Image (tube, helix red, strand yellow):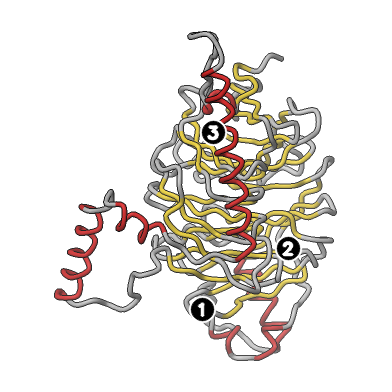
Amino acid sequence: MAKNYKIVSEVVSGSFDGQIILWDLAKRIPIFNINSKHEYVKGLSFGRSGNEFLSIGEDLKINLWNKSLLFEQQSELLGTSNSKGNVNNLELGTSSNRINESYSYTPKHTFNSDSALDSIDHSYSQDQFATAGGVVALWDYNRNKPLTSFKNSGDGFIKVKYNFVEENILLATGIDRSISIYDSRIQTPTHSVSLNNKSSAACWNPQEPFTFTLGNEDSNLYTFDTRRLDKVKTIHKDHLLAVLDVDYSPTGKEFVTGSFDKTIRIFESNEGRSREAYYNKRMQKVYSVLYSLDDNYVYSGSDDTNIRCWKSEASKPNKITSVRESTAINYRKKLLEKYKYNPDVKRIIRKRNLPKYVVNKQKVRHIQKESKYKKTRNVEMNSRPGTVEYSMEKKDKIVKSGVIEN
């Protein structure tokens, strides 16, 4: 899934059968239902204008879709006309029940890649985009071939992300467990970090351009500061299986994650534990998550072919609250903040209803953690003072760090 940074209510989604749907979330209807000809959709990204979006698939093709052209083609397919010519006018799509059917639209332009494609992200200030797969390639709208390519990972890349503020800086995660930072203005990569496991998800903090968060296959998330890559800034724990996607809120204070353990969690950027956990009985592993631009909702796309909308704060009312209601809500929040370290209050705040299999795995993980701690204590008590060395977990997670050598 990908969100439109110009229109709050627009999200585009892709599936394993090659179908792409542009959604109007405010009305809960599809605007376009596209049969993209991809064998299956691997990545999506909106352009900086909000009128165009890109899609990639296993067929090594990058399709550029223009909403204005899609409206014109929709008029011909449905036998109607859009006299207003406005790309945000949804009356054309809602006037017919046939909008739920998939149609073969023609993209504005198609780029052919020489290597596999697994991820795509668009620049926030230029008509350029980056793809990751066999190599990290930078593309321009006016050229059919990449402007430049980076390849320091022997096995290929999983994810690529542009920085929100420094538009020339890119972050890429490799299959060989590496995390690389590139500058599109030079041909040489800047820094590289290797972890113990692969990172399937990555996202920059929109308010702190030097901070990024990785979703790792060891079920943890790692927040790094680019000014000091020799250790992890914060380790976020609570998931039980591999983290598949992560996305920051517009404020940069929180991020949402989706995992193989069929749960969605919301973390504060500087906290190690999640503040909220969502699940559904029918929901399977979560491949994609998004944080809405108004900071009120999170969206999830899961293996059961559904896109779900969740409130970022479960207890926050959707309606417009009166002054009296707002005062009461703020008063209760201040009480929780004041007594949050009280054991009973802390237990109530932390309590979440979770699936049985998640609770059972949490118990097993707790037993493993206690056993490891007891073993370390026993070794310390039966050894000479000063012979047992303790290591920092934030440094142990990093295998190597430094400048990439050409």
Question: What is the secondary structure assignment of the residue under circle 3?
Answer: loop
Q: Nearer the viewer, residue 294 or 123?
A: 294
Residue at the spot x=81%, y=32% of the render?
A: 155
Asked if the residue under mark 3 is in contact with the one under mark 2, i.e. CB atoms within 8 Å, the reply is: no
The residue labelled by disc 1 is 89
**Residue 160: image x %, image y %?**
64, 41
**Residue 355: image x %, image y %?**
59, 66
Q: Tell me which amino acid carries mark 2.
A: Pro
Q: CA distance from mark 1 to mark 3?
A: 34 Å
Q: Is residue 12 left or right of residue 14?
A: left
Nearer the observer: mark 1 or 3; the answer is: 3
Q: CA distance from mark 2 to mark 1?
A: 20 Å
Q: Tell me which amino acid carries mark 1.
A: Asn
**Residue 45: image x %, image y %?**
61, 54
The mark nearer the N terminus, 2 or 3, is: 2
Crowding at dot 1, Cα within 10 Å, few <14 / some 14-19 / many 20+, comes out as few
Q: Tell me which amino acid carries mark 3.
A: Asn
Question: Which corner quadrant holds the C terminus?
Answer: top right
Question: What is the secondary structure assignment of the residue under circle 1?
Answer: loop
